[in-house]
Image (tube, grey):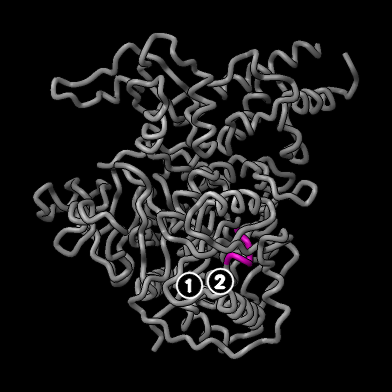
Amino acid sequence: MNQNVVNLFESIVRRSPEKTAIVFGERRISYRQLAEDVEQVANGFASMGIKHGDCVALFVPNSPEFVVCFYALTKLGAVVLPINHLFQEKEVSHYIQDSGVKCVVTDSYRQTLCQSLAEKIDKPFDIVCIDEASNTCVAYSSFFEKEAGQENSNSVDPNATAIFMYSSGSTGRPKCVPRTHAQLRAEVDALGSSMGISADDNILCLVPLYHAHGLGNCLLAATCNGATLVILEPVTENSVPIETPFMFRCARVFELIDIEKISILPAVPYILKAMSAAVLSNEPNISSLKLCFSAGNFLEQSVFDAFFARFKLPVRQLYGCTEAGALSINMDGPERATWDSVGKPLHGIFIHVVDDDMQPLGVDEVGEIVIDSPTLTNGYSNMPELNEEVFKQGVYLTGDLGRFDLDGRLYVTGRKKMLIDTGGRKVDPVEIEDVLMKHPAINEVVVVGSNIENVGEIVKAVIVAKTPNAISEKDVMSYCMEHLTDYKVPKVVEFRESIPKSPLGKVLRKALI
Amino acid sequence: MSEEIQRKVTEVVLELLPAVGEGELGLESDVFSMGLDSINAMTLIMNIQSAIGIAFDPADIKFENFRTPASIVALIRLKSGGGST
């Protein structure tokens, strides 16, 4: 029975072993090679004692090793926890402890951070390093030194957890979203059939694989349909990968689209904005592209227009969430003026728009978007109260607002929940408020997203100090830098004597922007 | 001329980094580690072009050319004839 993604992947390998599965810089990896690597790495993890139900964190940037480890661990029945490779120690520590991680896969650039964590956390975990491992880490390369052992049978229960992903929410810390093998498999089936992905496709991966968008719409979409996954390789400086703003990668992206005949381009709005404005020697050849879609954030009309004006290709929108993966996609042709629609639900997925009493609304009526899908998580880990609140009557309340048009296309119009979108990254203001409230000189803090001309939305902290001048802007910044990833650190700090509130005590956030 | 370019470049960078004070931005400061991100990178390039009245070539759009005020100034000077002022 093909009830999980590994079965599906293996059937693809049997069907077309010599087809290129992954392109990464100079590396071209066939499905046969990928499957052999998966087997070796699965044996390697098994020899370390990793077994069914154990959680293993993938704390590495986009790379073929991410894909190999994902399938190797899934095959063993272990639970994969992808972690943002830009996270700092405190955030990684939270994820590792919250998920009870047994092993962290990382690279030489991040292994010191992992070693330092391993010394501080009570529950021990192993570290596997995918490149140059130090003495205390297991070298990924050692997995390949042994003769290929017996093939791991793939008899994992489809209802067992395959992956943990963390979702930013409007309340409290990021929430752990477990998804089963069957749920991932259902997502692959829904997306593949609705988008018509085939082995002829080449999918370009520009978005992070640790995120639901990259994992579902790039990694799984390609490797479970026999397509080729082209991963944008990082820029390196003295052999160390450096985070490079996407603007400076545009020329390489267009080169990849042309050379690798990319047919599907999953993106986020700022990538499309940068591509539309890219300064290039020659107009790029993107004639191979049949579908370019945006997810992760609302697509502005100006971005759609700029992209269409330059490339004559309509950017379409996909709607999804960490809790259920991809949910709908707009597959309209260029003749349709539906730039702002996220399209129709994927095959097998039901989306409804309801009022506050959970009653379905009519055409063009705005309400909360709720999801009924075989791809949907069974609920957040260890959050019974929240689960009761957002998983009601067999559906998931997304916190997004939307409406359907007469033809059944969905439009996302806003959010009931509140997140700051800074540079394409979602920031939960409550997480930053939690950190700042631990500072001894701060009495009250509210974090908001503030729009600045030519800059976009930035994180702003409005602070009431315990005593006047007890804390400076610089103190706030350095405290945040110590405890938060760079992009979560407030760009603007404002001190006030009090926080404006409504008569009912609700913070008037709009007055703080 | 060179000082004028430096002043304009600093102004453009500071405009995009509202939390950074004038005294905190040095010529060798890495603007991307001070909070400039992918979206702002594009705005930085466009704003510098309009502030200086210069058009960058595709080959100029490299990370290392825009990483510090000094590297931006060096690029502008190179584009404006390469000489010192």
Numbered range of the magenta stretch: A62-66
Q: Are marks 1 and 2 in contact (CB under 8 Å)?
A: yes
The answer to whether residue A311 of the structure is visible from this angle is no
Q: Nearer the viewer, residue A375 or A123?
A: A123
Q: Which mark is residue A333?
A: none
**Vertical position of residue A1 compared to residue A216: above or below:** below
- Residue A487 on image: x %, y %: 52, 37
The number of numbered badges drawn on the structure is 2
Residue depicted at 58% across the width and 42% down the height = A274
Say whether residue B74 is magenta: no
Q: Is residue A422 above or below residue A395?
A: above
Q: Residues within 10 Å of mark 2 (few under 14, many from 20)?
A: many
Report the residue at 38% width, 21% height from top. Answer: A442
Q: Is residue A420 above or below residue B8?
A: below
Front residue (pair A198, B19): B19
Residue sticking out furthest to the right? B83
Look at mark 1 in the image and give the residue it sits on.
A197
* Residue shown at 36% from the left, 71% from the top: A180
Residue type, numbered disc 2: Asp
Q: What chain letter is assigned to the residue under label 1?
A: A
User: What residue is shown with label 2?
Assistant: A201
Instruction: Give left or right: position of A129 versus A483.
Output: right
Local crowd size for mark 1, using a 10 Å CA cut-off: few (<14), some (14–19), many (≥20)? many
Q: Answer yes or no: are tags 1 and 2 on the same subunit.
A: yes
Q: Main secondary structure of the magenta part?
A: helix
Is residue A461 visible in the rendered structure shown here? Answer: yes
